[in-house]
Amino acid sequence: MFRVEETVFDRILKRIRENVRTCQYVMTIHAEEEMDDEGFSIFDIERGILTGEIAERQEDRETGEWKYIVKGESTAGDEITVVARLSVTGRLVIITVYGE
């Protein structure tokens, strides 16, 4: 029987999605401003995460924490990119969002 091993990104993405499904996330003021500027709603951000994949992982220069770039689809079917990190409390922190 062939078994595909789960990658680290798969596990992180599952955690991120679970946080969205259970509303265990917060948005930074910057993310809220960018959401408004791009014409997105909170539903677009949630859908982007739930339909997306982790495209990249970056280390924050100041804190050393990992942040994840998730590329997915908005409710209108447009490409949306969400940058987020998992806090020490396990809550998802949405740092910024933008369209392509």
Image (tube, helix red, strand yellow):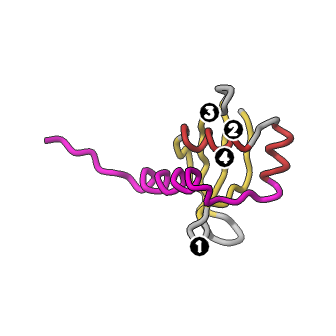
Q: Residues within 10 Å of mark 3 (few under 14, many from 20)?
A: many
Residue 82: numbered disc: 4
Mark 4 and mark 3: span between their CA atoms? Answer: 10 Å
| Dot in front, 1 or 4 | 1
Q: Which label's residue is closer to the chain start, 1 or 4? A: 4
* Nearer-the-camera pick, 93 or 98: 93
Point out the stretch of residues depicted in magenta.
1-30
Query: Is 66 rendered above or below residue 74?
Result: below
Q: Which label's residue is closer to the chain start, 1 or 2? A: 2
| Rendered image quadrant of residue 8 | bottom left
At numbered mark 4, what does the secondary structure look like: helix, strand or loop?
strand
Residue type, numbered disc 2: Asp
* Nearer-the-camera pick, 4 or 49: 49
Residue 89: numbered disc: 1
| Dot in front, 4 or 2 | 2
Q: Position of residue 53 (x, y in %)?
A: 52, 42
Q: Position of residue 98 (x, y in %)?
A: 74, 41
